[in-house]
Image (cartoon, rainbow, N blue to C red):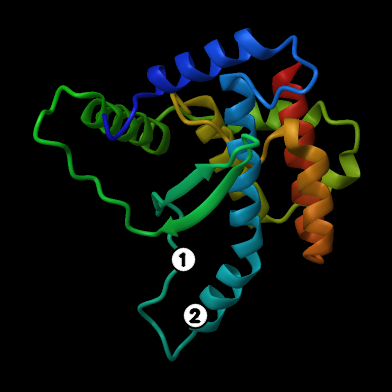
Amino acid sequence: EITWSFANLKEYFDRDWEENKDNPDTKSISYETLLKRLERAISIVFLSAEQEWKRYYDSRKGPSNPEVKYCSNCYQIMGVDLIVDSNNHPRVIEVNGQPSMALSKNSNDHYSVTKYSMINDYVNMIFNPISVAQDLENDLSDLDDQKLVSALRQSDMEYLLDYKRERAFQGGWRPVYPNVEHKKLHTSFLKLQKMTTQRKRVHDILMALEKQAAA
């Protein structure tokens, strides 16, 4: 087959890991470890682009571009192509802002079923009418650093509401950021990016909320 299903991929990596895990020189990894490495690689790509996307968006706002407006309900699906090297480390090849949603000729094969499932989970995550405001308020009130919470702006709270809603209804999606398992990497990387004080506050709160959810 040209493409594998996730089940095929899992079977291959887990079988290889079981056969080689006792070898001290093995480069084999489990399927779950592979997914975590994929998360790390993808998250760094998008965090790298964050400031440039913001600069581009801000440069297009204003009276001279009235068609450019903030859209609180706008989302974009982006496709990330990766390869895995001989050491089982993923490498990002490209990011596609308009990935194909076309199905294969056989609507029941794993390629089409995966896309059906992805779109279903996407719609459920984005357009679920259930309110998460009270849950977010409760979570924020449980954080140790209330000065951090009190410094949040309205736009920060709107972002956190989106985060909370997405996390509650993520279905088969895996979050790459925020992700408490990659906290050290993301914090160090954002420091290199010279994040603003407000961005650091939001990052710290996101990591604290992720830690709460994982407890």
Residue 151 visible, this angle = no
Number of numbered discs present?
2
Residue 60 visible, this angle = yes
Looking at the rendered structure, the kind of residue marked 2 is Lys
> Residue 187 — which label?
none
Within the image, what quadrant is residue 35 found in? top right
Considering every residue shown, the one lying at the far left of the view is 105
Looking at the rendered structure, the kind of residue marked 1 is Tyr
Within the image, what quadrant is residue 154 found in? bottom right
The 10 Å Cα crowd at callout 2, few under 14, some 14 to 19, many 20 or more, is: some
Residue at 43% from the left image edge and 91% from the top image edge: 64
- Marks 1/2: CA distance? 9 Å
Coordinates of residue 158 in the picture (x, y in percent) = 59, 49
* Vertical comparison of 138 with 37: above or below: above
Residue at 62% from the left image edge and 34% from the top image edge: 88
Residue at 84% from the left image edge and 51% from the top image edge: 188
Q: Are circles 1 and 2 on residues that touch, CB within 8 Å?
A: yes
Residue at 53% from the left image edge and 25% from the top image edge: 168
Within the image, what quadrant is residue 130 found in? top left
| SS for dot 1 | loop
* Residue at which label 2 appears: 61
The residue nearer to you, when weighing 80 against 134, is: 80
Coordinates of residue 201 in the picture (x, y in percent) = 81, 51
> Residue 70 — which label?
1
* Vertical comparison of 100 with 117: above or below: below
